[in-house]
Image (cartoon, grey):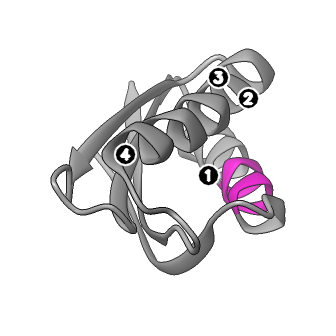
Amino acid sequence: MVIGVCTFDLYLAGIHSLKAKRGVLKRLKARIISKFNVSVAEVGAQDSWQRSRLAVAVVSNEQRFANQVLSKVSELVVSNGEVALIDQEMTFF
């Protein structure tokens, strides 16, 4: 069993309240979950209006499959026009 975790440090331009930030993240998380059937949570920068840290986790029998899923999630995050990717880190257990 392999657990893959990818964390994304995001910048949300034009956001001026935590309510607006939650709306953007809610849409992004819903897209990721519905498309890839993974777990997503905001794990950092929760009090900052324009910064966020999301973690995405997938469980698989093979590391290759987990890597493919997380890479596709990364592509979706990068292509999202509401957030800018600052940094990402992928780890396997």
Question: Which secondary structure is most common in the magenta stretch?
Answer: helix
What's the CA distance linking mark 3 and mark 4? 13 Å
Q: Which mark is residue 55?
A: 4
| Mark sitting on residue 31 | 2
Give residue 89's mark. Answer: none
Image point (62%, 49%), residue name: 70
Q: Nearer the viewer, residue 26 or 76?
A: 26
> Which residue is denoted by mark 1 in the rendering?
67
Classify residue 25 as left or right of residue 31: left
Tell me whether the residue at label 2 lies in contact with that at label 3, contact meaning CB atoms closer than 8 angstroms: yes
Residue depicted at x 40% and y 37%: 19
Helix, strand or loop for disc 3: helix
Q: Quadrant of the N terminus?
A: top left
Which residue is disc 3 drawn over?
Answer: 30
Stretch of the chain drawn in magenta:
71-77
Q: Amino acid at mark 1?
A: Asn
First along the sequence among labels 1 and 3: 3
Q: Nearer the viewer, mark 4 or mark 2?
A: 2
> Which of disc 1 and disc 2 is earlier in sequence?
2
Q: Secondary structure at mark 4?
A: strand
Q: Is residue 77 above or below residue 9?
A: above
Q: Is residue 14 magenta?
A: no
Please rate how many residues cluster around mark 3, counting C-alpha atoms within 10 Å: few if below 14, some from 14 to 19, many from 20: few
Left or right: 89 as drawn, with respect to 71: left
Q: Tell which of 2 and 18 is nearer to you.
A: 18
At label 2, the amino acid type is Arg
- Residue at (52% x, 40% y) in the render: 25
